[in-house]
Image: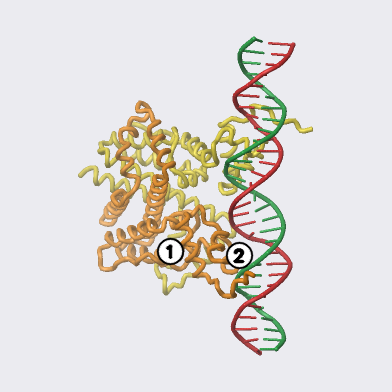
Chain colours: A orange, B yellow, C red, D green
Amino acid sequence: MPTRTPRNTLNPDLIIATALELMETRGFEAFSLRALAGELGVGPMAIYTYFRSKDDLYDAVRDHLMGLLPPAPDGDAWPDQVRAVCRGLRRLMLQHPCLAQLLAGRPLSGHETARVAEGLLGVLRSAGFDKQTAARTHTTLFTYVLGATSWEIQMATEQRDPKGLRRLRTTMASLSPSEFPTVVELAPELARTTGGDEQFDYGLDLLISGLSATATS
Amino acid sequence: MPTRTPRNTLNPDLIIATALELMETRGFEAFSLRALAGELGVGPMAIYTYFRSKDDLYDAVRDHLMGLLPPAPDGDAWPDQVRAVCRGLRRLMLQHPCLAQLLAGRPLSGHETARVAEGLLGVLRSAGFDKQTAARTHTTLFTYVLGATSWEIQMATEQRDPKGLRRLRTTMASLSPSEFPTVVELAPELARTTGGDEQFDYGLDLLISGLSATATS
DNA sequence: ACACCGTACAATACAGTGTACGTTAGCGAA
DNA sequence: TTCGCTAACGTACACTGTATTGTACGGTGT
């Protein structure tokens, strides 16, 4: 005699929290509305009372995660502020790997996402950059963080499962040293640069250093 | 009396070419093995004679596309060579938008992909960078191009369909100027920096300029 | 010329997906 | 207590990738 689930067990925040939990435990690809509904103890269509589509839910989860990003510390010099924001975003993406795919797969929207943009743009404008340069720099920094960290996560997850790791090794081993001398020679270094704080900061510092050069001129 | 399709109508190259064509005409998301098989005039399972899985086919298509990338021009100074390679990759991604998702979604593998890495690494090593720096720079440049161009394509496709364009406008209009003063003030500039050669080159030049600074020191 | 056999393709099936549509029942308000 | 709103349900559809099993064709050896 299964009683019907009570009336107001669902709400957007609960759905978002449960969806996020599922994405992180079973992986972003494995996430489905049916699994989510099962976890919530409701039928698959109940989700549609609160979100128009799966993509709509994705947007909500993404915006929720963006809300966790700490604001830029004020008082520091602008290069340190920029560094802090970019590192913060990368850190958040590493803590919540699904964020990478949520950011890459859909255009930005949402209140919290706008707050993050406001923070970084504010730092750049306060530093004295003109409107055009601030906007360009913002886009450049954002896309760098997105690309670098998505790649890092991709490589990490690939190396985690034994099948992927074996595939990486065999593709590396199949490269003939005569045809690809540099790749083969730099294989150890390349393997070490597929992620990590140092690799990320290296690229970030290149950008900031290039930016300082244009700022002083 | 439909005669059975003849014996050797299929081969890997034909499958790859047809798959690529489908991805570009109907979009990467809409691509399915059944649609591909239909286009080839065979049953869905015929593909599995030549590729172990859909991902396997993805890898093959990606490697095929990477083969279209022109090699780095030799004779130029290294900054120009780096610029040429990065611009070439971006250009290729813009010409074949599915390449962005093929690159972002799976780890690298394949002969042609290795050839591209060999080219860029060779440029960097010839320029005098040590192994570590060459490897780091290679990863940085690659992830920047991937992130920036993926973002650019994403925005472009979003703006193409009227529904997405309307969504972008409404989210922009819904931002209160008091809460997000900088975003609202820079809205025109931000709209202009979501893509284009100038935006890409701006970030690329920041990287190269930062790189030149470390090279001379 | 003929039989043979490996294999290229076919047919069927399964477990899963997002979501459109129409129905029903729990709850707050009157 | 009764009513109406709407949150949650059930069913259904058109898909997906792919495991498994079947079949007939084409090249090869005699």
Which residue occupies 59% across, 71% down? A5
Which residue occupies 30% across, 33% down? A185
Q: Chain of mark 2?
A: A
What amino acid is labelled 1 in the image?
Leu
Q: Residues within 10 Å of mark 1 (few under 14, many from 20)?
A: many
In which image quadrant can residue A127 be found? bottom left
* Residue that protrudes farthest toward the left in the picture: B217
Residue on which the image places disc 2: A43
* Residue that protrudes farthest toward the front in the picture: A1
Q: Is residue A30 above or below residue B170?
A: above
Secondary structure under the numbered disc 2 in the rendered image: loop
Closer mark to the observer between disc 1 and disc 2: 2
Q: Is residue C22 left or right of residue B190?
A: right
Residue on which the image places disc 1: A65
Q: Is residue B129 left or right of residue A160?
A: left
In the rendered image, is residue A24 in sight? Answer: yes
Secondary structure under the numbered disc 1 in the rendered image: helix
> Residue A203 at what x, y percent from top left?
31, 49
What amino acid is labelled 2 in the image?
Gly
